[in-house]
Image: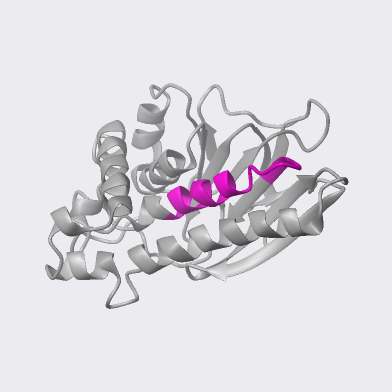
Amino acid sequence: MTPVAPPAPGVVHVEHVMGTAVSFHLHVDSTRSNADIRRAVESACAELHDVDRVFSTWKPESPLSRLRRGDLPLRTAPAGVHQVLDLCAQVRDLSSGWFDPWAMPGGVDPTGLVKGWAVERALAALRAPGVSAASANAGGDVAVFGHPDEGEKWRIGVRHPWRQDALACVLLVDHAVATSGTYERGPHLVDPRTGERRTSAASASVVGPSLAVADGLSTALAVGGDDMLERLAAIPGYEGYLVRPDGTEAWTDGMPFAG
C-alpha cells in the first residue's frame, strides 16, 4: 500500500524496523529548518524502535516474549503492553472473536494490531511545527494527517494481491487504512476459533479513525471473510474492502473509493 501522490515540497524517510520498511512522507513548510524536521523524524523512528523492543516475538528478552513464556507477570509489564492489550480486547469484542490475540499458539500475541499502534505513535511524533501533512506506511498499515494538497484527502493505493505492478483500488483517507493478506508473508493468519491457519481473503482492507483498531479489524476481516465484513458494516466509523481468494470483491457501503 502506498500514497499515490506523495506531497511536495516534502521530506521522505525510510526506516527499517519491526521486520519491515516504514516510510514517512512529510509536507513541510519551507521556512522551517532541516534540523527541526530531522528531530521530528528521529522522534518518530525512536517510537518504532521502542515498540519493537517491547513487542517483538523474535527477541527472546522482549517484555512480550517474557510475558508469553510466563517469565514476566502482566502487572509488571510496561505500560504500553497494557495499552495494547486493552485495545486488543476492544477489537476482539468488535469483531465477535475473529480477532483474538489470546487464542494464538504460544500465548498472547497482539501482532495483528501492534504494528498499527506503533505507526500511530510514530505519526504523532511527526506533528511538529512546520509539518502540515504527513503519512507513515508500514507494509500496508498507513496513518496520515493533514492534506497533501489544499483541501484534498490522501489518496492511498491498495496493492493488487496477485499483480505486483497493479493496484486493487485507490482510497481517499482522512486518518488510517490497514491491509492484511497472505501475498507477502504467506499463510500466517490463524483462525482464533480453531487455532489453525486460515484465510478467507486474498486481501482485506479497513479504513477508520484509528490505525491500531483498523489493523486488528483487517486481520479479523482476512480470517473471517464475508462474515466479518457483515459485522464490520455495523461498526461506526470503519469501512471494509475484501478481495476473496477467487478474485471476487465485496465492500461495505461507505468504503471511500477514489474516482
Q: Is residue 151 left or right of residue 242?
A: right
Q: Is residue 200 left or right of residue 211?
A: left
Residue 189: image x %, image y %? 35, 58
Would residue 159 be visible to someone looking at this image? no
Residue 140: image x %, image y %? 56, 53
Residue at 19%, 66% in the rendered image:
68
Residue 238: image x %, image y %? 47, 29
Would residue 124 be visible to someone looking at this image? yes
The quarter of the displayed image where residue 166 is located:
bottom right
Give the total number of marks visible in the rendering.
Answer: 0
Q: Is residue 249 left or right of residue 168?
A: left
Structure colour scheme: one colour
Q: Quadrant of the C terminus?
A: top right
Viewer-proximal residue among 219 and 87 = 87
Residue 10: image x %, image y %? 82, 51
Vertical comparison of 218 with 23: above or below: above
Vertical comparison of 101 with 250: above or below: below
Extreme bottom residue here? 60
Residue at 18%, 62% in the rendered image:
107
Residue 132 colored in magenta in the image = yes
Residue 15 colored in magenta in the image = no
Residue at 65%, 54% in the rendered image:
40
Q: Is residue 2 left or right of residue 114?
A: right
Viewer-proximal residue among 32 and 115 = 32
Residue at 19%, 49% in the rendered image:
193
The quarter of the displayed image where residue 67 is located:
bottom left
Viewer-proximal residue among 248 and 24 = 24
Viewer-proximal residue among 49 and 160 = 49
Specify start and end residues of the magenta stretch as a single range.
115-134
